[in-house]
Amino acid sequence: MKSKYKILTDPDNHKLNNNAGEYYYVEDLIAQTPDGLIRVRGKYAATKIKFIGGIWIIDNDHSIEQKPDIVNGSSIPWFGQWLISKEGKWNRSSGFHDKGYKYAKIEFFVNGRWIYYKKSRKWFDQLYRSLMESRGVEEWNSTTQYEMLRSCGWWTWWNYRRHDE
């Protein structure tokens, strides 16, 4: 059975000139979910998206420059990096999670346009786990990261939400 979750693009990323370890993607990071296509904006937008023969065809022709979403990748705490490094198959999945925590919403591709929809913290945590599993991350690793997010992620979620007001 095919996964309902899949990252469709694997764009390059560029680090920013800061100490926070933040970066942006050059092209859009796009994933398929049961709810539809979602994205993290890169510097250049995907200009053509079509569903042909049961698969999504995405054309990044670098003609549209946009403000990219800033992400920090897998935010593994320093004390856990001996077990799980910040780099790995899970890093692209974390781009969607980072955007979700920051804005409490994500862009869906609906009727040829990208539209923001609000989602819960639990939804973003589950998205992260499902995207990791679709990329072949070992079960112990995805479960460990998911359980840490569910246990400790409320602090980051709350910090972003208090700035929303």
Image: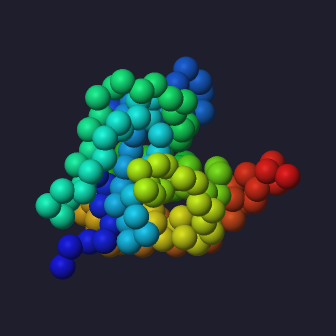
Q: Name the outermost residue toward the front.
A: 111
Q: Which of 62 and 154 is in front in this view?
A: 62
- Left/right of residue 113 with respect to residue 141 in the rendered view: right
Q: Whole-percent x and y of residue 12?
A: 33, 33
Quadrant of the image occupied by residue 101: bottom right
Answer above or below: position of 128 versus 151.
above
- For the N terminus, the quadrant is bottom left
Answer above or below: position of 12 versus 145.
above
x 24%, y 57%: residue:
51
Visible in this render: residue 21?
Answer: no
Q: Name the outermost residue toward the bottom.
A: 1
| Count of marks overlaid on the render | 0
Visible in this render: residue 165?
Answer: yes
Q: Nearer the viewer, residue 36 or 156?
A: 36
x 60%, y 27%: residue:
19
Q: Whole-percent x and y of residue 39?
A: 44, 49
- Left/right of residue 13 with respect to residue 22 in the rendered view: left
Quadrant of the image occupied by residue 6: bottom left
Q: Whole-percent x and y of residue 61?
A: 29, 29
x 55%, y 37%: residue:
70
Quadrant of the image occupied by residue 42: top left
Q: Name the outermost residue toward the right.
A: 165
How is the model colour-coded?
A: rainbow
- Left/right of residue 53 with respect to residue 102 in the rendered view: left
Q: Name the outermost residue toward the left.
A: 53
Q: Whole-percent x and y of residue 128?
A: 45, 63
